[in-house]
Amino acid sequence: MNSSKLITFFFIFFVAVSCTPRSLSVAQKNACMAPSANFKALDAIHSTKIHAILWAKKFAKQASSKELSLSDKCRQTQILIKALYGLRDGESATWENPQNNTSGKIKILNTIVQTGIWGYGGCRDYLSYIKIDDKLETFKFRACPKELGAFELVDSAGFPIPGHLYFAGWYFYDYRFFE
């Protein structure tokens, strides 16, 4: 690898690493941690547990893409907490910020009621929609209350999956591991 490629790689790496923690730490400091509002940063951090090259790609993608403002992250977090604690299956909560050309929505899909060795009683599956400048991103998550006492759930192949994060009394998991 010639020196210019190496320098370019390290520059991109430095920018990605230095930008990511700041936006996520500001969101965390302000209790605005909805997984969809912080997905790219959380996904990059989560991928460090999986593979180094995947981690570098996701950090670079997160650093170069437009993200929600702190106030929009907080709005998404507020409707998420409202939805998890107060909405019935099939119901939705939304917000909109015309000034930033952003909006969001949480739709509760279902509440898991079975318990036992493979049951996650009380977990809620939901869709989260984030729209920035007319670009819509959809995320699907499983949120499980702290009372279940487990940070890792078993995925569809039988492997333990750690949550993306814990906040507001819930563990959050990327749903793609359960399909």
Image (cartoon, rainbow, N blue to C red):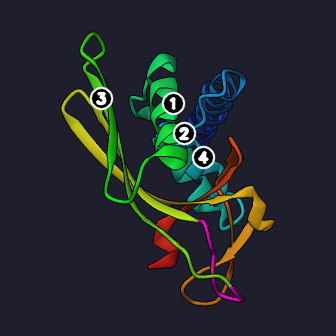
Q: Which of marks 4 and 1 is nearer the N terminus?
A: 4
The residue tagged 4 is 42
Residue at x 48% of width, y 59% of height: 141
The residue tagged 2 is 81
Q: What stretch is highlighted in magenta?
A: 116-122
Amino acid type, mark 1? Gln
Residue 73 visible to the viewer: yes
Q: Earlier in the sequence, mark 3 or mark 1?
A: 1
Circles 1, 2 touching at the beta carbon (< 8 Å): yes
The residue tagged 3 is 103
What's the distance in space between the residues labelled 3 and 1, CA to CA?
Answer: 13 Å
Viewer-nearest of discs 3 and 1: 1
Residue at x 58% of width, y 82% of height: 114
The x and y percentages for residue 35 are 54, 45
Amino acid type, mark 3? Ser
In the rendered view, tell whether residue 86 sits above or below residue 117.
above
Viewer-nearest of discs 2 and 4: 2
Residue at x 31% of width, y 46% of height: 137
The residue tagged 1 is 78
Residue at x 52% of width, y 52% of height: 57
What's the distance in space between the residues labelled 3 and 4, CA to CA?
Answer: 20 Å
Q: Does the magenta stretch include residue 117?
A: yes
Amino acid type, mark 4? Leu
Circles 2, 3 touching at the beta carbon (< 8 Å): no
Total numbered badges shown on the rendered structure: 4
Query: 13 or 66, which is in the foreground?
Result: 66
Q: Is residue 179 magenta?
A: no
